[in-house]
Each structure stands twice: as structure tokens, then as C-alpha cells.
Amino acid sequence: MKKVLLSVLLVALLVSPVFAQGEKEGAAAAPKQVVLRLADNQPLNYPTVIGDEEFARLVGEYSNGRIKVEVYPQGQLADEKSAIEQVQFGGIDFTRVSISPLASFQPLLNALQMPYLYRDANHMWAVLNGEIGKYFLDSMEEKGFVGLVYYDSGARSFYNTKKPIYSVADLKGMKIRVQESALMMGLVQALGAVPTPMAYGDVYSALQTGVIDGAENNWPSYDSSSHYEVAKFYSIDEHTRVPEMIIASKITMDKLSAEDQAIIKKAAQESQAVQVAAWADYEKKSEAKVTAAGSKINKINDQAEFAAAMAPLYQSQLDAAQQEWVAKIKAVK
Ligand code: GTR
């Protein structure tokens, strides 16, 4: 037995340099393909994943197939927070995330997602795709990331298993799941409810078993996570517009040539149009789907009441620099 093993090893040693040489020669003829991985916690056909796939397609096209981006949806690689951590140390090359948990890594981002910050979606896009948005994408570098592009994520509202929310008082004492974000904890507390930070993938069963009473999200997530099956009351208050971002690992990007880095940045920027169109389409379909499935949907009575309750967050959650950014954002026409 030992003898057989020894001869197998010998043969392997003898032939391996040949293989190595063959590989090298092949590499000289056709440059080796670089395979990079992108993590997304949303399912296939969700607008962010449609955007990721467009990004991957464009990278393939612009590099003539030399760079391949593989998209892993549905949290296959990691939950959102772990995906960000892994991108930071180079274990995953890209991830598409909500900037809410991302702000734990780059707190400056909180200035982009304050409650009732934007007048409407157009105002948000003017900010994100203008100089301010560029500054925030670039600010990711000092934390070990390269910010590539913003994606749409609509507006977030509360939903719960108990009753419709009309006024701030209705939320009193309710246990509300939030993303892993200090700002979101503060926001829910400001409304008199009890925040429970939790990974996205754990929310369905927490709603079902009554560990929490509710959560908050946009229409597409309320739909695709199936939370509408267990939390029937969706109350439109649209407290925040939280954009999403594709970030690259700075470790990965630093290994690539300047030309390839430019290809990745261009492809990501250009994928935005497809993602935004997919978002608009999915948002309408989700609202119709959850309504047909029996969700009880209502508008809150007075948005000004909610905005007033959350206004102190602009002081308590933001430092002077962030407050200056907020002023600049509000001034964008
Ligand atoms: C969704 C977002 C996810 C995740 C989720 C959550 O809108 O697309 O990346 O952040 O919200 O609430 O955890």
C-alpha cells in the first residue's frame, strides 16, 4: 500500500512541472480569466440582483471576457453585515448592500439616509448622482472599500402583525426589527417603539413567533421576504429613502490594472439605469401582489407628526461634519 502511494507521488512530482509549463504557455497565448464574486442578500429577479447581473454582463463585455463577475444572490455567501466585513478584508470581491448597515463602517453615510431628508426621489437622485454622491462613494476608500454605484431602494415604511399605524402613539411600545444600524435604533426609539436589531434572514420567523411585532422596509422587500404573509398591516409613512450601493474590496481593486479598475467602475455606473427601471417595475408589482394577498394597507394621518418626532435625530445622531453635509443635501435643487 505504502509502495503504491509512493509511486503515485513520484508520478505526480514528475508530471506536475509539465502541467505547470503547459498552463504558463496557455496563459501567454490567452490571458488568464479573472473570476470575481459579488454577494447580494436579495433573491434572483429582485431589482438589485438584476442590476448586479447587468454590472457583471458589462464587465464581461468591456473586458472581452477577461474579467468574470459571478453573482451570488439570496445571501448564499453571507448575511449583509458579514458580507461587508468579508469585502473589507478581501474574502469577497463585491457586495450590493443597503447603506444602512454600511454606515457602521463609514458613519458619514448616515448623512445620506436621514428621515424625511429628500423632498422626493428626484431630489435623492440629484444628490446621489451629483458631486455629493461622488464624494460619499469616494469616502469608502479610507475604510477599505471602493464605492462603485448607487441603486434604488424606494422608501421604507412600517409593517406589523398587530394593527394599522396612523399616528406616532400607535407605535408606542411595539417591538420593531431594525437593520444593524445605530441610526435606525435611534429612529425607532424616537417614535416610542422598541428597536430590535436583527439580520434580515431572521425576521420572518421572528414575526411569526412574536419575538417582534413589526419591521420596516420598502414594497419589494416586504414582498420578496414574504413578511407580508405574517405581518399584514403595512402603514405608509415613508420615513426614509435608503439607497443601496455596490462596494468593491479595495484589496481586490488594488490587484487589478488601472484599465481593469476603470472597466469595473464604468460597468457599475452604467448598470444603474437597468436597476432603477427594474425597481420601478417591481415596486408596482409588489404593491399589487401584497394587496391581492390580503395585506391591510393604510397611509399614516400626518407625515409632519412623524417628521417632528424624528427631527431630534439630526442633532443626536450626526456630528458637525455630517450636519454640514445635510445642509448641502437640502440645498440641492
Ligand atoms: C432591504 C435591502 C437589504 C437589507 C434589508 C434589511 O431593503 O435591500 O439589503 O438591508 O432591506 O432590512 O435588512
Image (tube, grey):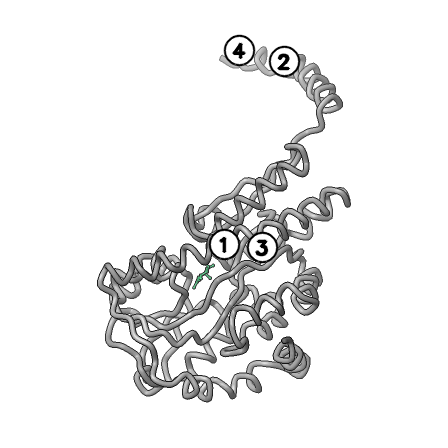
Q: In the rendering, at what x and y percent does residue 46 appear?
A: 43, 51
Check disc 3 and report the residue beneath it.
Answer: 246
Q: Nearer the viewer, residue 57 or 106?
A: 57
Residue denoted by label 2: 10
Which of the marked residues, 1 or 4, is nearer the chain's N terminus?
A: 4
In the image, residue 46 sits, relative to residue 66, either above or below, namely below
Q: Residues within 10 Å of mark 4 (few under 14, many from 20)?
A: few
**Crowd around label 1: few <14 · some 14–19 · many ≥20 (10 Å):** some
Helix or strand or loop: what does disc 3 sit on?
strand
Q: Give the residue displayed 52% in from the left and 88% down from the top.
A: 312
Residue at left 57%, top 40%?
A: 57
**CB of mark 1 within 8 Å of CB of mark 4?**
no
- Which dot marks residue 298? none
Residue assigned mark 1: 277
Q: Nearer the viewer, mark 1 or mark 4?
A: 1
Asked whether disc 3 touches disc 1, contact meaning CB atoms under 8 Å apart, the reply is no
Specify few, some or many for label 2: CA neighbours under 10 Å numbering under 14, 14-19, or 20 or more.
few
- Mark 2 belongs to which amino acid? Leu
Residue 167 in the image: state x and y as whole percent.
Answer: 33, 85
Q: Which quadrant is the C terminus positioned in?
A: bottom right
Mark 1: secondary structure: helix
Residue at which label 4 appears = 4
140 relative position to 155: left or right: right
